[in-house]
Amino acid sequence: MTMKKSYILSCLLSLCCFQIFAMNPGNEEPDKMQWWNEAKFGMFIHWGPYSMYGGVYKGHQQRFGGAEWIFNRCKIPYLEYRENASHFHPDRFNADSLVLLAKKAGMKYLVFTTKHHDGFAMFKSDASEFNILDYTSFGRDIVDEVASACKRYDMKLGFYYSQEQDWGNPGGATARRPMNQGWAHPDSLLIDEYTQTHSGSWDGFQQTKSFEEYFNDVSLPQIKELLDRYGKDLSVIFFDYPVKTTKEQAAKVLDLLKEYPHIIINDRLQKPDYPGDYKTPENMVPKAEDVEGLYWESCMSIGNSWGYKSWDTRWKSPATIVNYLISIASLGGNLLLNVGPDAQGIVRPEESGCLVEVGKWMEGYGSIIYGSSRSGLKPSWGKVIRKDEGKRTVLYLCVDKWPDNGELTLEGDWRPRKATILQNGMPLRFSKGKGCLIVDVPEKAPETTLAGTPVIIRLELTKRLPAERLFTNSEKSVGNHGLDG
């Protein structure tokens, strides 16, 4: 290679490196992820015609899973479910009340189910008549009402959209579930045999189109409809259940999203080619190593079902939700907490009451959650949340197991400036131990404002620790492919 060619190549490489760095410097957070990473707490809403069943079909309680799956698990005939959906008339629904409940709970964003796996769109759609305006006499566009309320009350707006699973529009994917998850149908064996040989579908109407036709005629056009109407105000899209979606089909969705680079998408559009911006563990707090260096969000429901289940009795307490928030924040994640309104659009007292109590705790201590980051610490006595406040880093020690000897130890070479119990403002002494910091605490743990939640000690350090570089799921995936060759 000549000197001249070598020089030109060197300049081109330098320019490319500069452009890559300018788009996403190694120590800076992607702009669209900043608000999300600071928000930490959002509301998920699963709601549609499945709420009319409440988890019960022909007098039988659905045996397994969330009530939003009743169409599939109980193998309700296609025309029967659609006819029942035509009577969906949630005239007590109030979008303002829902958004204000989320704000009262201390939530910063809301993700609403625009279409779940039953195929019923909660918005006006030209791509399928199976929607709340064309298929019912209700006469209101629920998605539009939710979007408007979010704008009124300065709540970040997100949409859930089932892009693949669709049991109410021909050609949609129909994940197989055996009849023993639904009810004791007298023809269970025959139905199971039929679904086994028909890719999970249980009704001939579901097979009158191919998945390719469904994707091109319903899924892609509906995503475009939502983006055309709300794209500028939309912050998050939560896709779900990728099995059949091809790389080429996912690319068509992403082509639509190019016009809206501010929209964050999850990891469920298509796997493994499009891992999205963040991971979505469900109904669990993941292991630290599984989400290291990533943006992630755990979605959970207050009850035992995403959609309304009339006989649900397994409710999470406000203290349980707060403890989940603390655990998730200590690992650098977000919590998307679900409610499932009933057929009239009402959020049950068990859910709304829980959220109000969580909101009271957040009003007093939410500052340790918002804008927090992973601490990387795993003490035996509880959790540690990190926050960078001005020129200093603060560690919030959330103590579940109060020490008997009056000494709380934190492994590492720490240089604290001061330590204070948040619940009562009591200053604490501290000293260096062998490879650890020792904080002197009272013999008896102080009372907390919500029983069952930890005592919180604010440990202010003398300096700001180096920031952790987070990657979107896609960036991490690209990085891993590069390392693996």
Image (cartoon, grey):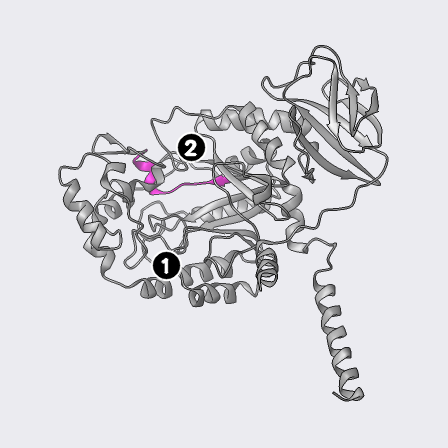
Inter-mark Cα distance, 2 to 1: 35 Å
Residue on which disc 1 sits:
244
Element at label 1: loop
Note whether 254 is above or below 382 in the view shown: below
Q: Earlier in the sequence, mark 2 or mark 1?
A: 1
Q: Is residue 163 left or right of residue 107?
A: left
Note whether 91 is above or below 203 in the view shown: above
Q: Residues within 10 Å of mark 2 (few under 14, many from 20)?
A: some
* Spot occupied by residue 265 in the image (x, y as percentages of width and height): 54, 54
Q: Report the front residue among 91 and 206.
A: 206
Q: Is residue 270 left or right of residue 416?
A: left
Q: Quadrant of the N terminus?
A: bottom right
* Spot occupied by residue 287 in the image (x, y as percentages of width and height): 56, 39
Residue on which disc 2 sits:
346
Q: Residue at x 75, y 17 (%)?
A: 407
Q: Report the front residue among 380 and 346.
A: 380
Circle 2: residue type: Ile
Residue at the extreme front of the image, as rendered? 434
**Callout count:** 2
Residue 434 in magenta stretch? no
Q: Nearer the viewer, mark 2 or mark 1?
A: 1
Q: Residue at x 49, y 28 (%)?
A: 352
The magenta region covers 44-54
Q: Residue at x 57, y 54 (%)?
A: 473
Residue 52 in magenta stretch? yes
Q: Place residue 424 in its image quadrant.
A: top right
Q: Report the front residue among 72 and 168.
A: 72
Q: Place residue 399 in its image quadrant.
A: top right
Q: Place residue 388 in its image quadrant.
A: top right
Note whether 142 is above or below 184 in the view shown: below
Circle 1: residue type: Lys
Q: Is residue 51 left or right of residue 223?
A: left
